[in-house]
Image (cartoon, rainbow, N blue to C red):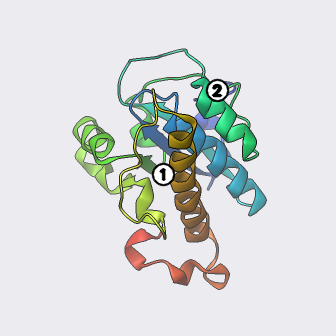
Amino acid sequence: MRLFNRNPSLLPPGHRSILLVCTANICRSPMAEGALRKKLWKAGLDFDVDSASTHDYMPGMPPYTLAVATSKRRGYNITGFVARRVRPHDFKHFDLILGMCRANIEWLKAACPADGHRKIRLLTEYSFEYRRQDIPDPYGGELCDFETCLDMIEDACDGVVRSFRPASDHTAELPVDLRPV
């Protein structure tokens, strides 16, 4: 879900990239993209962050209104995002692909070449409070469902950011299996 098209081949050498994935790319993954972008930026980390869906339910659509409102209240602007589906190229381009739930992970692993499976993780593997829990899809729910979803996302995104900091900046807090691949 990009605000604009950027040619991945023009990214600087050593540039890192993360793809966040949910079912329709209108609730969880755009909220996660907005949160992770801001947290990485605040930490001074340069990443290409994008989001996508496992299914073609809402291609070209903006994020769901409650996802936009919830994100905005927490300081994340996702209004210009547009839903898209995961593309074969994504499995080569992105260094880390984070699904919101186990169903997303299963779909990603089925669609990804076997040599790319190590890049695919559940977002909450990086979480402290919600470790390895599925982030429930809030679509069709109430505001409190979106708030809970974003609570889980923010906690996990904090862990992702910590995992990319130099060892002197708390990477050692994460188990070795959760450090960047």
Give the image quarter of residue 131. bottom left
Amino acid type, residue under disc 2 in the picture? Phe
**Horizontal and vertical percent position of residue 90:** 44, 36
Q: Secondary structure at mark 2?
A: loop
Image quarter hosting the N terminus: top right
Residue depicted at 53% across the width and 52% down the height? 153
Would you place residue 155 above or below residue 166 in this image? above
Give the residue pinned by disc 1: 95
| 7 with respect to 118 (left or right) | right
| 72 with respect to 117 (left or right) | right
**Residue 181 visible, this angle:** no
Give the residue pinned by disc 2: 81
Residue depicted at 63% across the width and 44% down the height? 48
Residue 121 numbered mark, or none:
none
Q: CA distance from mark 1 to mark 2?
A: 21 Å
Depth check: 66 or 44 in front? 66
